[in-house]
Amino acid sequence: MNERTGVITFKGNPFTLLGPALKVGDRAPDFSVVDTALAPVSLASSAGKIRIISAVPSLDTPVCDTETRRFNQEAANLPDNVVLLTISLDLPFAQKRWCGAAGIDRVVTLSDYRDRSFGLNYGVLIKELLLLSRCIFIVDATDTIRYVQQVPEVTQEPDYAAVLDAVRALL
């Protein structure tokens, strides 16, 4: 298992990421997560679509809450061939509760709690916390990674404009 240091901090403290450092042009790895009804979801579940995949530590934290709400709002301005997936290690029951309370209706929340295959395959599992780091991947309809934004400080929001510009460049 790859261990990568010097990539992220959490509240200013350095942490270790487990898994590969994916880059633009790489084939997007498969993963096995579950939705809020405990149904299995993989990369193939959204085949043929452009995917904005947002990895977050927990929806129950202020920055993750803000980020997911923002992407939910932005989704209204994107065509139907773009799907937004937010993946965390929150339990599906907590994700469902949070989405209901937050009015999230365009972002699909998914849980990597079972085997952390997303976190490990995409290189965003924080070894010391067993949470996902804040990272955005854009995967095109052919399962090629077209954009990666690893947020260096986990407690900061991503650059939304850069993500949306990258998606629009694929349309």
Image: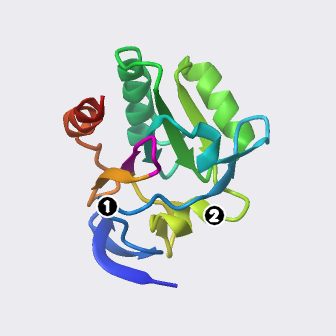
State the image quarter where residue 3 is shown: bottom left
Horizontal side, residue 144 vs residue 34: left or right:
left
Residue 45 drawn above or below residue 98 = below
Q: Position of residue 1 (x, y in %)?
A: 52, 85
Q: Residue 144 placed where, x, y %?
A: 40, 53
Quarter of the picture holding the C terminus:
top left
Q: Is residue 28 above or below residue 156?
A: below
The answer to which of marks 2 and 1 sits earlier in the sequence is: 1
Identify the residue at the far right of this view.
38
Percent x, y of residue 153: 28, 58
**Label 1 packing within 10 angstroms: few (<14), some (14-19), many (20+):** few
Look at label 2 and name its amino acid: Arg
Magenta residues, as a range? 136-143
Could you classify mark 2 by the number of other residues whose Cα lies within 10 Å: few (under 14), some (14-19), or many (20 or more)?
many
Q: Disc 2 vs disc 1: Cβ atoms closer than 8 Å?
A: no
Q: Which residue type carries mark 1?
A: Lys
Quick one: SS at disc 1?
Answer: loop
Residue at 47% x, 75% y is: 19
**What mark, if any, has residue 61 been given in the picture?**
none
- Dot label at residue 116: 2
Residue 37 within the segment the image draws in magenta = no
Q: Residue at x 28, y 71 (%)?
A: 7
Along the line of sight, the residue nearer the viewer: 96 or 164: 164
Q: Residue 11, labelled with which disc?
A: 1
Residue 155: image location, x then y, percent:
33, 51
Residue positioned 37% across, 26% down in the render? 70
Secondary structure of the residue carrying tag 2 is loop
